[in-house]
Amino acid sequence: MMMRGIFPALLISLGFAGVAEAQSASEPAKLGGFKDWQAFTYKAPDSKVCFAFSEPKKSQSTREAKRGPIRFIVTNYPGRKVKGQVSTIIGYPFKEGSTVKLSIDDKDFTLYPVGDTAWAEKDDADIVAAMKDGTSLKVAGTSWKGTQTTDSYSLAGISAAIDEIDSACK
């Protein structure tokens, strides 16, 4: 699996300004808010980067779990020829060797975790298309301690947010 855009995931996970400065990149600028989704851009050392993200509307787990930030992200990184890369930050380290189930309405996809972030291996375009046509998205994963979680997201505004990052990062 290629980790094509780990920097946007790190920015969102750890907080924008501190990581951006540490990586010699510009601080993210907000492109806009689109119902349940936000769009941002920043200048990485080798390319402009645009991303849209949302936070879950609901989270469930098999037991109480201490979690960090939880996000679902779509990233464009034209300098690396990346468009519509999907990833999720789950707020805990995933169980090693596990997979993550992504459900968009009645369509299922598999994401592959590294640390607290999971990516699609090759289904990005199909996932983005399903997101634009869908109404809800769920991410189900297992923590390194065995806690199973399911995060539910609204897809309200996703088409406009993706259109905005596509326009800003051609």
Image (spheres, rainbow, N blue to C red):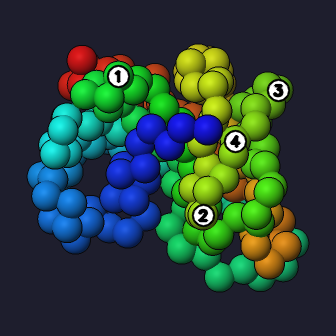
Whether residue 80 is visible, yes or no, is yes
Q: Earlier in the sequence, mark 2 or mark 3?
A: 3
Q: Residues within 10 Å of mark 4 (few under 14, many from 20)?
A: many
Q: Which residue is mark 4?
A: 111
The C terminus lies in which quarter of the figure? top left
In the image, what residue occupies the spot 29% across and 36% down? 50
Which of the two marks, 1 or 3, is nearer to us in this view? Answer: 1
Q: Which residue is mark 3?
A: 106
Comparing 142 with 129, the one in front is 142
Q: Earlier in the sequence, mark 2 or mark 1?
A: 1
Which of the two marks, 3 or 4, is nearer to us in this view? Answer: 4
Calculate the distance from the C-alpha at mark 1 to the C-alpha at mark 3: 30 Å
Of the residues shown, which amino acid type is indicated by label 2?
Answer: Gly
Residue 18 lies, with reference to residue 71, above or below; the image says below
- Give the x, y percent position of residue 75: 40, 35
Calculate the distance from the C-alpha at mark 2 to the C-alpha at mark 1: 24 Å
Calculate the distance from the C-alpha at mark 3 to the C-alpha at mark 4: 16 Å
As drawn, is 30 to the left or to the right of 84? left
Q: Which residue is mark 2?
A: 115
The N terminus lies in which quarter of the figure? top right
Q: Which residue is mark 1?
A: 81
For numbered disc 1, what is the local secondary structure? loop
